[in-house]
Image (tube, grey):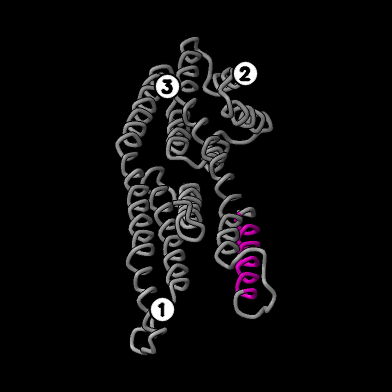
Amino acid sequence: MYVSVVSAIIGVAMIATTLFFAFFSQDQSIFNPDELLFAALVVSLFPPAVVNILDSRWRNSVDRRIPDFLSDIAEAGRTGVTLTRSIELSAKRKYGPLSSELQRIVSMISWGRNLEEVFKEFAERVDTTLARRTAILIVETNRSGGEMKEILEELSRHISELTSIENERKSMIRPYVGIMYISFFIFVFITILLIRTFFAQMQEIQTLATEAGGTLLSAGAELSQIQRVMFHLSLVEGFFAGLIAGKMGEGSMGAGLKHSLILIVIGFLAFFLLVWHPIM
């Protein structure tokens, strides 16, 4: 949260600087306003995108090891030990990031905390669907008592099935993320094609009309202004297409920041290499 706020403040400051150089300053900046606007967006998006990627990897790593953890406590339950003792024994095993969470749970229980409260806090820290369901089911298992071994084994199978269903859902929805990329590429391609053909020819006609003393065709917008508007539209398209891709692919707008950043960079490079400084 703090990273997003700081990045947004820096980005707004850079955009304000861009507007100042574009409209109020008489001095020529090293970079043109569009390049400064692009830099402001990158600065605003890059840190939150990196933090979101690292956070998502941590949460996914925890989710991947939850079925193993449940299987182990079910195995420990066969020896007749209590659920709390099973969790203590499992916490000594290597589950990646989940191990540190289990050690925290064991520490809190040893300090006299209630099992229900501890797993509720665990679900809030991890904040994934699988973690919340696991916490609720473990709490209900502890309340019910009875044949702990059979309950834990059934719980382990249930969570494994949920994990398989979620992985299948992600694999089915992944192609729709590619559709967002393809739609952005088509938008940028058509935009650049229009600029280099239709609008460039219109600019030539306006120039000839002006030289010939005409006034009707010479009153149109300049090509540089059209290029700027189209570039700004590509930034808007890339930003929102990335957010939609993240929502569709990973169920979170925040996960789309990395897609937005990638699309914005691609759009900038396309304009830089094919419109402002054409290499072909």
Q: Residue at x 50, y 55 (%)?
A: 268
First of labels 2, 1 by sequence position: 2
Main SS category, magenta section: helix
Q: Secondary structure at mark 1?
A: helix
The answer to whether 160 is drawn above or below residue 18 in the figure is above
First of labels 2, 3 by sequence position: 2
Marks 2 and 3 close (CB-CB < 8 Å):
no
Write down the residue under mark 2.
Answer: 92
Which one is in front, 205 or 189?
205
- Looking at the image, residue 21 sits to the left or right of residue 126; the answer is right
Q: What is the C-alpha distance between the residues marked 2 and 1?
A: 78 Å
Q: Residue at x 50, y 42 (%)?
A: 127
- Looking at the image, residue 138 sits to the left or right of residue 217; the answer is right
Crowd class of label 3 (few under 14; some 14 to 19; many from 20; radius 10 Å): many
Q: x and y percent of residue 272 in the render?
A: 51, 56
Q: Amino acid at mark 1?
A: Thr
User: Which of pointers 2 and 3 indicates the residue nearer the eye?
Assistant: 2
Write down the residue under mark 3.
Answer: 152
Q: Is residue 19 magenta?
A: yes
Q: x and y percent of residue 155 in the render?
A: 39, 25
Disc sitting over residue 207 in the figure: 1
